Amino acid sequence: MLDQVVPHRPQSLLATSSKSALNIAQNLDQATRARWEAALLRSETSFSRGTCFAPAGDLPSRFFVVLEGWVQKYRQLPDGRRQVTGFCLPGQACDLNLLFQISRRHALAALSSVRVASLDRAQLLDLIDQGPDLKEALLRADMIAANMTSEWLVSTGLKSAQERVAHLLCELFIRQNPFLIDPEVGLPATQAELAEATGLTSVHANRVLRDLRMRFGVSTRNRKLQIPDFGALAKYAHFQRGYLGFDDS
Amino acid sequence: MLDQVVPHRPQSLLATSSKSALNIAQNLDQATRARWEAALLRSETSFSRGTCFAPAGDLPSRFFVVLEGWVQKYRQLPDGRRQVTGFCLPGQACDLNLLFQISRRHALAALSSVRVASLDRAQLLDLIDQGPDLKEALLRADMIAANMTSEWLVSTGLKSAQERVAHLLCELFIRQNPFLIDPEVGLPATQAELAEATGLTSVHANRVLRDLRMRFGVSTRNRKLQIPDFGALAKYAHFQRGYLGFDDS
DNA sequence: CGACTATTTGACGTAAATCAACGTAAGTGG
DNA sequence: CCACTTACGTTGATTTACGTCAAATAGTCG
């Protein structure tokens, strides 16, 4: 009954379906998954677009899991400059800092209307104590998330603006559509937010998107993302899905 | 007897000494630490500066710990562009990908002459099975390393070249000298390597270093780094040590 | 409808890349 | 010891990518 919070095709329907290590529930056995989902549903909250529901800086007090909508992790400097360091999609835990009691330097904000579940440390530890599987799944997911950050660093550090934006679009496309079945996927982020995620200004991001539209037919209208020739764009952006934690390749 | 491989002042000598979560051995009790260090010494290897001893791409076959010297994690695109994604200093594990059997997208290379220890998966699992402490220490250290990557992403994404290089120098300074006791620390990386770590060309990194030398008295001569007024540089670079995993602040 | 918020375009300035030398220290072999 | 090599650092001239400032257009939601 929690399946709706993870709006992917149910695994059973697709012979070729693969699970992603990012999605916690997909990596649990029946019993553990039931406990996990029950705990999440008990602590559900909603936030409207733009709301920052977890500030940066101090030791985090809650652990968040996205149920519906997108969350962005970002860092803001005193002078106002912002850098988005990751997007969290449904099924994903935002970070594991609470578990290790490590201070969280990024803030969490709702990128669209979101439903999130949040646990305090005692609840999280209690769940984890009921068997090793959940902890393993959380750790794996967090390692994948770290891989993604590293991938963004590589993108931002050595690729052109075009390649960077293309890479981000490829990532967001594949995360929602690992088998390229859907012609389009959701894209709640605005151009300004895509810019903050790629280290560009919104003006330049706009021009880059126009460029990618002309060269690859990429469309980002109406909160939807279309990539007609995914292979071409992926090649151009040096995108390889290996880091996203799917159980295939 | 392994103390020499981690060339810091012994903890006992300094009332104010703090341990870093990055340094695995510092976070183990006596018995676990002894097993850990014994296992490392059994598998010691040396590499000369520039040697790439772990390629990127496939599932890693070995787990590496730095005993002496510096290691760089980097990614290289087919066209030759390189991005350094992290420096590993003595006492640090390079990555935990082998434990989770996640493919490693970065390569490991010796930045100076290095001694590293390497374990295969069986050896690593065997060590971990002897008690929960080691695994906990490894995971913590890996989370801190992930924080550092995220910090680099923020630096690279939204800071000026000057701030970025300054931030990196602050980080490297503090990691070797958490209490600002030593006037200078080691800096085996060349300007070209600092450039690759900050997303600049070596030419521009050179100019930026000259600029920082004039403005803050920073010196990077002879593989040594001096930062006379650390506070000023840290403020300029928006550097805050909180993400480095020291048990204080 | 009006008040937003998001996207798009233009003109211009600046930071950083690129290309091309040249300097300098450290090592190597005769 | 000197000639030679190699790696690293430094500088200048030029080009390009990207940021900044400003304004117009297009959606979106009450």
Image (cartoon, coloured by chain):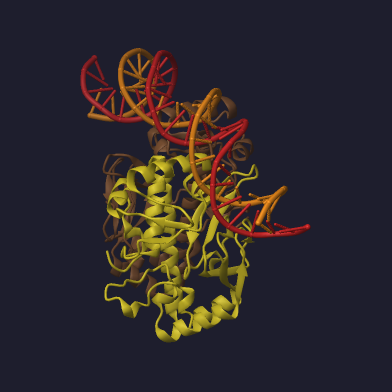
Chain colours: A brown, B yellow, C red, D orange
Q: Position of residue D10 (x, y in %)?
A: 49, 41
Q: Is residue B178 left or right of residue B93?
A: left
Q: Quadrant of the C terminus of chain B?
A: bottom left
- Total count of labels: 0
Q: Residue at x 32, y 49 (%)?
A: B233
Compare residues B135 and B222 and report the one nearer the observer: B222
Q: Quadrant of residue B46?
A: bottom right
Residue extending furthest toward the bottom: B31
Q: Position of residue A231 (x, y in %)?
A: 63, 39
Q: Residue at x 51, y 55 (%)?
A: B189
Q: Residue at x 36, y 64 (%)?
A: B177
Whether residue A204 is visible to the viewer of this picture, yes or no, is: yes
Q: Is residue A205 left or right of residue A180?
A: left
Q: Position of residue C9 (x, y in %)?
A: 44, 17
Q: Position of residue A113 (x, y in %)?
A: 33, 42
The correct choice, above or below, for A40 with respect to B195 in the image is below
The correct choice, above or below, for B6 with respect to A25 in the image is below
Compare residues B160 and A241 and report the one nearer the observer: B160
Q: Is residue A56 left or right of residue B146?
A: left
Compare residues A136 and D4 and report the one nearer the observer: D4
